[in-house]
Image: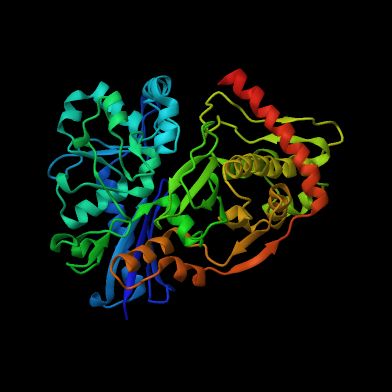
Amino acid sequence: MKAFVGADIGTTGIRASVYDERFAVLGSGTGESILHRGPEGSITQDPEEIFRETARAVREAVLAAGVAPGEVAALSFDGQMAGILGIDENWNAVTPYDSWLDTRCALQVAAIGAKARDAVIRKTGNIPSYNHGPKLLWWRANHPDVFARVASFVQPAVYVVGRLCGLRGRDAFLDWTYLHFSGFSDTAAGDWDEELLAWFEVPRDKLPRIVSPYTVVGEVRPDQAEAFGIPAGTPVAAGCGDTTSCLLGAGAAEVGIAVDIAGTASALALTIDRFSPDPTGLVYACRSVEEGLWYSMSYINGGGMNLEWFREVFAPQRSFEDLNRAAAEVPAGSDGLIFVPHLEGRGYPNVPGMRGHWKGFTRQHTLAHFYRSLLEGMAYEYALYKQSILSRQPEELELVVRGSGGGARSAVWDQIKADVLGCDYCTIDREDIALLGQALIAAGATGHLRDVAKTVRGLVQVQRVFHPDATNTRLYAERVAEYSDLLYHDSAGHG
């Protein structure tokens, strides 16, 4: 038997699973993601803690799986995408992991936006935000001595792979699924953009080489074998970003499949066949793991947290099942009540001053109305993403949405999304999508799978389909237009 290990180095935790040749889970393990909060918006992680906790998760998974040492055929890691970590020539960390949650580079975000916003969107597929480019410039401006020691800026999964395989600074790599966050890439070409590098005086030698997720970048070195529970010499793939791994693992490997990751940050992504940057900055364009496929997507920062907040503040004695049953009794449109879900600023596009609110409530509105309107408000945001994506497609594109994450277990919310988006909304039979994506990459990188896209289509099965109700879809189209007007006024007032 051959086994494949996938690991997910996330913001809220680290997970690993071992899969057999049919991609059934044999064993799993976990580790901590430890955030360190400091002054002036500083949110970092200790690279040593990231490495140690990832090793623990992988080792636990291998022990739980009970596989023989020679049965592990390959590993692959995904991780947080928008932050950076500086390494020196010997692969020592010379900076902490500057998290995507860290806002200290706000001045650099503004400077890049003022000078080259349109060019950055057109070339990278993404707006200037709290991602690689502004963070790199922040380190150069605020810690020039540290910046001088940096051989390359990498991401957490890449850092772990480099330590595990004994790589040097000159071996630093970035797989192409991260490029939209880079700030300096020609994402369509899969290369660094010389014009953007020149405009911001960024040395190309501070940036890693760009590779396919299926590139074998090294082998487990002997002195790390025991810590990870993996035999020395086991090949390690480049892997990809965590969100992209979720999309692959959910089966979004063909045009027209959209994925709703209904988690802490609620994201909607649609698989398309071309690089399609959005000049308005509402959605961003990024590469798929599979060459020739792309995603257009955006997200609600803290979308899933809105549900937890509502229950804790307004209904602490009621379960989500109870709230969902009550919401199902409220008519579509919540009798005119509209909720704006950006409680702590809009994440993408970045409008930090925007705040959440309800519009149109009266004494006739009940707790159930408010809860249903919360579910509807996040679906309205998704509808704007869909409109933006489809407006730039040269031909009509039929889409089906696959739901994943805790929110997808709410039947009333799934039906609301089907009605608002005007398309089928499906639940799937896998919850391990990020880890499955990495196991598939590990198998593909080492030649054990010839066609990953075909394989994942057979692995992920639809459980339940929610069809849109035409009457509700027409009503919701009016509500989406009203919601869009609310956002426009909020952006004008707080942008």
User: Along the line of sight, which residue is nearer the eye, 360 or 131?
Assistant: 131
Measured as percent of width and height from the top left, residue 438 is found at: 38, 61
Tell me if I can see residue 34 in this picture. no
User: Along the line of sight, which residue is nearer the eye, 48 or 156?
Assistant: 156
Quarter-wise, where is residue 344 in the image?
top right
Q: Going by the picture, which residue comes out furthest to the front? A: 394
375 in relation to 145, above or below: below
| Identity of the residue drawn at 14% across and 48% down | 168
In the rendered view of the protein, which quadrant contains the N terminus?
A: bottom left
Q: Is residue 233 left or right of residue 277?
A: left
Measured as percent of width and height from the top left, residue 309 is found at: 61, 40
| Identity of the residue drawn at 21% across and 31% down | 203
220 in relation to 108, above or below: below
Tell me if I can see residue 113 in this picture. yes
Q: Going by the picture, which residue comes out furthest to the right? A: 364
Q: Is residue 68 left or right of residue 91?
A: right
Quarter-wise, where is residue 26 in the image?
bottom left
Measured as percent of width and height from the top left, residue 276 is found at: 49, 42
Quarter-wise, where is residue 476 in the image?
top right
In the rendered view of the protein, which quadrant contains the C terminus?
A: top right
Q: Which scheme is used to colour this image of the protein?
A: rainbow
Q: Is residue 403 left or right of residue 23?
A: right
Measured as percent of width and height from the top left, residue 485 is found at: 70, 28
| Identity of the residue drawn at 26% across and 44% down | 47
User: Along the line of sight, which residue is nearer the eye, 400 or 123?
Assistant: 123
Q: Is residue 491 left or right of residue 109?
A: right
